Amino acid sequence: MPARIAYIELDTHAEIANRFHDLMLQSEAFSVDYYFSKRILEILEVDGDNIFLSSNSDILKQLNQRHYDLVVIGTVHRYFDLFFRITKRYHTAVICHNLNFIKASKLDLLNGILEKETRYRLKLLLKEKLFLKDKVYKQAQSLWVLSQELAQEKYEYLPLFYNEFDSAAENEIPTIVIPGSVSQLRRDYERVINRLYNATLPLKVIFLGKASGQELEKIKKLKSEKTVLDIVYFTEMVPQPVFDDWMKKADILWCPIQDETKFLGIKENYGITKTSGNIGDAIRYGKRAIFPKFYQNKYPFILLEEGYFSGKKPVFNFAFEDFTKDKIRKDLEKKLLKACK
């Protein structure tokens, strides 16, 4: 008889929920019910007898109506009082996205509240019981991370990303795709633009995300001044079919992530305490990806920026056979089976 799992996503990370859902569709070892907020359901557009509209006020009553061997919480960035009760009552696994936030002290959290977005962060503190954060993570039986470089000590790697598309691209002019919103906040577009000003050979460069403000003006200026570059950019959100099409056409992805970002005022370091969604992009579309030299990784398809742009011809020796859907599903099922015990 299949083990029964509840997967909860009430906040963000719809794409992670979608990966889990897609992988488990063909699973014979597990039966999964999904509890999604209205916002998540609108993004995913999934349906079925095992898909339930939920909210922080409904989820406990819904869970009580069925027996589950494991409850998976996709995001614990809100509703700490709710998830505290769930981890007390159920065998629980939590997907972890910001490791410094998890270990942050009450003083660190208070300083973050006073930094900005004070009204919203005070709501997390007073109404949603932010200070229960530590108990949620301590009571959960399993803590999962989404990339191999973050798997250490109490955090286990959860395989969710698989290769969906043929990686072959046939472009006369090398095509570099830079996926993600064109904002200096989490990615260093100043460094990208400065490097592109030094380009001497023809390149096609796609800024595959909405560009606005100073970044948009700098891209327009680059496009007008560097005729050796064929630049494509967007001033609105990129529709998913357009995003997919450009990603499939890419010869390589360029992921100029910043060394540091912040979550609720707590500093996080990419590759050390937080993973980049671009890892999943590279796996899904079967593409080599350029990352800054500071990024710690265990993936053979990642190239360091300094080496790639050094003028030397890079040597690629990897394949995406380790990321087929069937293999990732089997690896995921092993992880779920372990967590259910």
Image: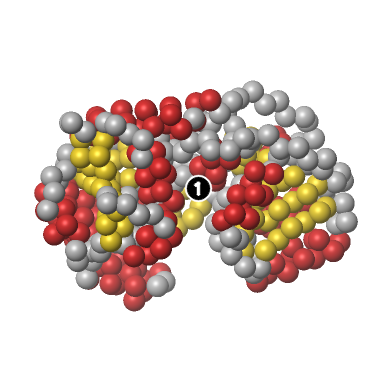
Residue 23 % position (x, y): 39, 38
Q: Position of residue 253 (x, y in %)?
A: 65, 43
- What kind of colouring is applied to the model shown? secondary structure
Q: Quadrant of residue 168?
A: top right
Residue, far top: 317
Q: Nearer the viewer, residue 301 or 235?
A: 235
Q: Residue at x 83, y 40 (%)?
A: 172
At x 65% / y 49%, what residue is drawn?
245
Residue 119, percent across and down?
Answer: 34, 76
Q: Is residue 244 left or right of residue 323?
A: right
Residue under the image location 81 percent in, 61 percent down: 223
Q: How many marks?
A: 1
**Quadrant in the rendering for residue 105:** bottom left
Along the viewing direction, whichever of 32 and 284 lies nearer the viewer:
32
Q: Is residue 76 visible?
A: no
Residue displayed at 67% across by 63% down: 234
Percent coordinates x, y for residue 108 in the rendering: 32, 59
Q: Mark 1 is on which residue type?
A: Gly
Q: Secondary structure beneath disc 1?
A: helix
* Picture layout, residue 196 above or below residue 304: below
- Residue 78 image-quadrant placement: bottom left
Q: Is residue 316 visible?
A: yes
Q: Quadrant of the N terminus?
A: top left
Among all residues in the image, which is located at the extreme front?
49
Which quadrant does the C terminus fall into?
top left
Q: Is residue 154 left or right of residue 237?
A: left
Tell me the residue that label 1 is attached to. 277
Task: Tell me if mark 1 has few (under 14), some (14-19) or many (20+) residues whose alpha carbon lies within 10 angstroms of its own.
Answer: some
From this view, report whether residue 221 is shown above or below residue 320. below
Left or right of 203, for residue 253: left
